């Protein structure tokens, strides 16, 4: 006669830990997939008005406590929504030479109602041995000093002592950034937006466009 087949069930004290491990593994897998999908969401911007929505990915080279604190200030999600519907998010407006000429005229003559503060973010040797500034009223604040010193997060007194001009008001002034050809000024504009400035302009042509290109550097 054949012996009856006996099924051996695992002890009850092993069943709950096994189920718990399976549920934890499933949760970790779903969370990782959601994180990857969220990180890779596209952010669409217009060529003239640049939203400050995924600025963290563009400025990932910045480190330190100041920058980490700034990265917590997100004005828009990448789908265009805002954290606070009542607060107008900052935008960066790109302008050409004709518009920059009008701004410089207002700055030189003290006219207009925009309270323009024009900042050249090139290095001082680059400016002095090359083109000079577009106007005597243009301030020099090199991009490396903005990034390493957290210039726009400094208090008013420290800012003026360090850079020799009053710190622009985040609420009242319109920041206008320029550089050699628009790249560094765009980064400076993004940093200003992260520090709470609302009215920001980037001159995309820069000194090359204003002074006539590489001729002035020869």
Image (spheres, helix red, strand yellow):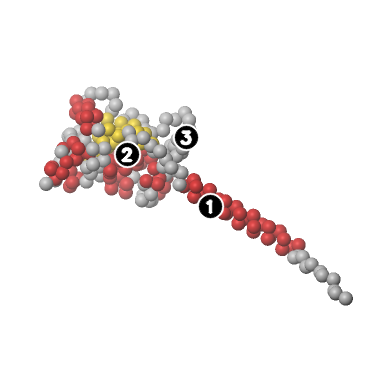
Position of 70 compared to 104: left or right?
Answer: right
Q: Nearer the viewer, mark 3 or mark 2?
A: 3
The dot on residue 32 is 1
Q: CA distance from mark 1 to mark 2?
A: 33 Å
The picture places residue 203, in percent across and down from the top left corner, at 26, 36
The dot on residue 81 is 3
Quick one: which residue is furthest to the bottom in this view? 1
Disc nearer the start of the sequence (1/2): 1
The residue shown at (29%, 36%) is 202
Disc nearer the start of the sequence (1/3): 1
Q: Where is mark 2, residue-wise?
A: 189
Query: In this orientation, which residue lies closer to the viewer: 2 or 6?
Result: 2
Q: CA distance from mark 1 to mark 3?
A: 24 Å
The picture places residue 72, in percent across and down from the top left corner, at 44, 43
Position of 141 compared to 71: left or right?
Answer: left
Disc nearer the start of the sequence (3/2): 3
129 over 114 or under it: above or below: below
The dot on residue 134 is none
């Amino acid at each position: 006669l054949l012996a009856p087949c006996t099924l051996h069930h695992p002890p009850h004290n092993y069943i709950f830990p096994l189920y718990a491990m399976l549920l934890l593994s499933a949760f970790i897998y779903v969370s990782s997939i959601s994180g990857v999908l969220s990180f890779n969401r596209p952010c669409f911007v217009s060529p003239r008005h640049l939203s400050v929505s995924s600025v963290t990915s563009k400025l990932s080279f910045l480190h330190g406590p100041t920058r980490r604190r700034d990265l917590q200030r997100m004005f828009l999600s990448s789908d265009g929504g805002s954290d606070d519907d009542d607060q107008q998010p900052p935008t960066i407006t790109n302008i050409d030479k004709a518009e920059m000429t009008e701004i410089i005229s207002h700055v030189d003559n003290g006219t207009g109602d925009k309270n323009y503060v024009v900042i050249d973010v090139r290095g001082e040797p680059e400016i002095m041995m090359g083109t000079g500034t577009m106007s005597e009223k243009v301030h020099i604040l090199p991009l490396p000093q903005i990034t390493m010193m957290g210039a726009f997060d400094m208090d008013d007194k420290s800012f003026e002592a360090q850079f020799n001009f009053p710190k622009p008001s985040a609420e009242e002034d319109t920041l206008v950034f320029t550089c050699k050809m628009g790249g560094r000024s765009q980064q400076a504009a993004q940093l200003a937006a992260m520090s709470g400035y609302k009215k920001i302009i980037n001159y995309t042509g820069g000194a090359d466009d204003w002074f006539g290109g590489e001729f002035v550097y020869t």
